Image: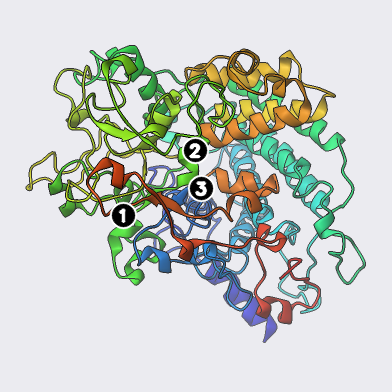
Amino acid sequence: MLKMKNIIRITAFLFLMGMLSCDYLDVVPDDAPRLDHAFSNRSVAEKFLRTCYSHLPDITDPFFYPGWYTSFDELFPRDSRSLRSVAALTALGQQNTNSPYLDFWSGNQGGKNLYVAIRDCNIFLNNIHIPRDIEEEERARWIAEVKFLKAYYHFFLMQLYGPIVIADKEMPLSSSPEELQSYREPIDVCVDYIVNLLDEAIEGLPLVLPDPSSELGRISQTIALSVKAKVLVWGASPLFNGNPDYKNWVDNRGIQLIPDTYDPSKWERAATAIKSAIDACHEGGLQLYKFNKYAGGPQTYNMNDTVVQLMTIRKAITEDIRLNTGIIWATMEMPANGKGNATGLGFASLGDLLARLFPYIYAEDQQSYVQYHDASWQMVEVFYSNNGVPINEDKDYNYSGRFGVRRATPGDKHESYIATGETTAEIHFNREPRFYADLAFDRGYYELATTTTDGGASFNPFLRWRSGEVFSSGSYLPKKIIPFESSASQGNSAYRYTAHPYHFPLIRLADLYLLYSEALNEVKEQPDAEVYYWIDQVREHAGLKGVEESWANASINPDKPSNKVGMRDIIRQERVIELAFEAQRWWDVRRWKTADQYWSLPYMRWTNTAKDPEDFYVVEHLPAYDRQVTFRDYLSPLRIYDLRINPNLVQTYGW
């Protein structure tokens, strides 16, 4: 009976396919072959390879990908139906052990069962030797790709759960129930296993894709090396490296699962891996992306330098991946209605991540169901001043008066950001370029191909979001991830939202640069030129001066970059800013063990019941969305049922 159940289980795995939109990575059709035929020749084996790819978590899914709405400190799902999503319920502190939300361990409540993905990888690796009509070079590459995927699925689980079960081998059909009862392994064992598997994969992968036009979505050495770097950074970071909160997390073997003693050598190992990844990326031709206004068509040729800088920041995300030199790895998925069980929430359109973040520019945009979700108040305050330092540290910034109102004049030199003659909040003035590239706000401009008629020299109309105007909103929107080429009504009720598809980045070169500065800062006794160099590359790309110069000239704490603790804070804030609205912040604040500082911040907005600016720009607090955070919220719980059927599993500590 047990043997028959295992046979049925294996057969079922072959039909558990995800959806990928890349030509190469088309999913296996419904008439997928049975296991005994799945490797009979190259054609069917290639379909199984696509199956292994098909389990990759979908970063364009707003409610089922953990990085978007599982906390409200970056984005806020304002629509009441969105607030019933599993992601929002997690952010509201309603995670549980009976039926955990976003359960990637067992595949429930929006999570994919990544152990099914790993088992498919094991089946592939155990059988790919069978087909005889495959060139050995191609077979070796396929094996390397699947080893990478197997490692990545383990890594994704590790980021969510910490210590995990390592599914290195496909269990024989004759295995007893006791043999199937595996243990969660200590975090250092997990890190080493994933890194070793990635090292095996790297040997068989091309440096970059030989033919990107036909192979888009496949894995290269640059991707594998970058993921390896991230694995080691996680292993070195405070959540997993000397965390006293988990001192008593011990399984029934008496093994401690996360060390409570800090090991600085882990940062040294991470730094070496990050530099190897950066070197490989450079060798493969990758560099930080820069926008060329003369290559952008008739809507961009006349842009001034200020707007070109904004476009460099935005296009670093939304540019065609075949032209974007700064993206290492991107998803093949595309935003779409219905994702994240949006249909079950009562409104399928909520599932389209980018459409619901598109702004109200005209009243006619209402028919496109735009602006259903917001950027958080915390993101408004986190961006630097125009002097390149935090606004609460800038000696010239009007921090105490930032919630007041101010009329934009020609002397402000903000004509590319804010409509001259209009009154808006003081906090919108004298900010760094990424503030204006990343955020949309009342009385600000929104640069789109359809909002310029003079080649990008100017953009109209500006956003009018007060009571009784185009839209009533006391909030902000993320602009950076919305393509310049997308549009909605354009003021014509016959037009609807039109997307401009692009491949959303999973890893960018700027991400590695900042990780390298972070690792070097932890390795060295105090910051030096090497630490500053890599973060300054990112700052220069964003239109800012270097760290040392900026703090020396503008900060009330000019010596902050000269010590490890101060530089650590600078690097972390730089990552939060540079990677804003890319579904990265949620992962970072967890590995830094700083989520309690961010997730518990009060939800704030401007009052949205007034038209007069003095009455509109009044900060209000909505306590219904406040959250208390404890150490247990850093890692996801296991389902109680899984613990019952496997007594060797131990629950995530605190749950």
Task: Single out the mark in the foreground, 3 or 1.
Answer: 1
Q: Which element carries disc 2, helix, strand or loop?
A: helix
Task: Single out the mark in the foreground, 2 or 1.
Answer: 2
Q: Which mark is residue 372?
A: 1
Q: In the rendered structure, which amino acid carries the disc numbered 3?
A: Arg
Say if 449 sits above or below 37 in the image.
above
Q: Which of the pair 27/312 is nearer the observer?
A: 312
Residue marked by disc 2? 381
Q: Quadrant of the C terminus?
A: bottom right
- Marked residue nearer the N-terminal end (3 or 2): 3
Q: Give coordinates of residue 638: x percent, y percent.
A: 67, 70
Q: Are marks 3 and 1 in contact (CB under 8 Å)?
A: no
Q: Give coordinates of residue 322: x percent, y percent.
A: 40, 27
Residue 633 visible in the displayed image: yes
Q: Crowding near pointer 3: few (<14 within 10 Å), some, many (20+)?
A: some
Quadrant in the picture for residue 5: bottom right
Say if 187 sits above or below 625 in the image.
above
Residue marked by disc 3? 42
